Image: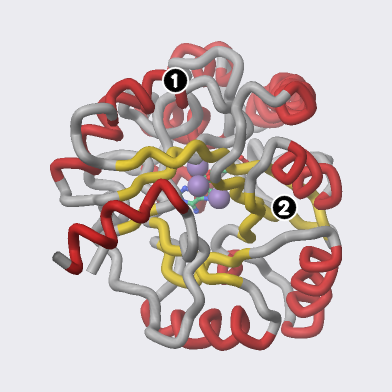
Amino acid sequence: MLNIDLHCHSNVSDGVLPPAEVVARAAANGVHALALTDHDDVSGLTAAQAAAAGTGMTLIPGVEISVSWGGQTVHIVGLRIDPLNPELEEGLIGIRRGRIERARRMSEDLRQNGILGAYEGAYAVAANKQMVGRTHFARWLVAQGHAPDLRSAFRRFLTHGNPGYVDHEWTSLENAVHWIRASGGMAVIAHPGRYAFNARELHLLLDAFRALGGEGIEVITGSHHPSEYGKFADLARAFSLKASRGADFHAPGEGIDIGRLPALPHYCKPVWQGWPELEHHFSYSLA
Ligand code: AMP
Ligand code: MN
Ligand code: MN
Ligand code: MN
């Protein structure tokens, strides 16, 4: 069976490893095809592509776009995108600009709760000064001793009702799917199990996503408990969406490692079905 992992992060967004090290780790873990899907930024893809050359592993250019839909933040993964597409690039620049302004408000909210210097602290943590997010704040809060680890940092801070949390309007679902498709990519709903939607709202999201040209949904992800895999595999089938698999790796020792997830349920149609760049892997495995 091919080991395909279509969701992970480098230090271009909120992961800790540079793109080349993410790629090397995937290859060492026996991954055949890896998508690097940094939040709202595609600037790691050149280094990732270069690092993948010669490993035998196929690098799929990807991105994870932050969207506001139905009063919540939803993540849309774009696979096989063209990182040079001007519409996509302009869109991502706008989202990253919004992140800077949100970071100021997060820092101000932390200050009002007695924690000073969070903005500068988060920026010092971020390797890419163009892409700052809650994880950089969380890593800084841990380093400052305000929380023992990342999970607790998100439990005490930066989440709804806690210091450092601010509402933020991301881009629309329509824009995200459009940019991905305009750049030749396939849009996939990331970790559907993470959203606080009820069944009716989730069905509305899937319908809206399909109507906009979205094609896939993550079934196997580090964000889903194994007991949820079947539910999302069924949902994919019911809504004629292709199924994706990705660890959502951010850092060694945090969550599931790259390429270490179970396979898709056999009745799922994988998102990678028919991708020509994977053909040679399939013929090798048959030989
Ligand atoms: P942002 O896009 O800046 O709002 O940050 C979202 C990121 O924060 C996610 O992609 C995760 O990497 C991280 N995150 C969110 N909630 C948690 C949590 N409870 N524990 C650990 N990481 C989290
Ligand atoms: Mn993240
Ligand atoms: Mn996500
Ligand atoms: Mn992710």
N-terminal-most mark, 1 or 2 = 1
The disc at residue 46 is 1
Q: Is residue 75 above or below residue 153?
A: below
Q: Is residue 22 above or below residue 167?
A: above
Residue at 58% in and 18% down: 116
Residue at 17% in and 51% down: 30
Q: Which residue is mark 2?
A: 73
Give percent across and percent down for residue 107. 66, 24
| Amino acid type of the residue tagged 2 in the rendering | Thr
Q: Quadrant of the N terminus?
A: bottom left
At mark 1, the secondary structure is: helix
Q: Name the image quarter holding residue 179.
A: top right
Residue at 64% in and 40% down: 163
* Relative horizontal placement of residue 39, taking residue 55 as reference (left or right): right
Q: Name the image quarter holding residue 241.
A: bottom right
| Rendering colour mode | secondary structure
Instruction: Work out whether residue 163 or residue 188 is closer to the camera in this orientation and state it.
Output: 188
Give percent across and percent down for residue 67. 75, 47
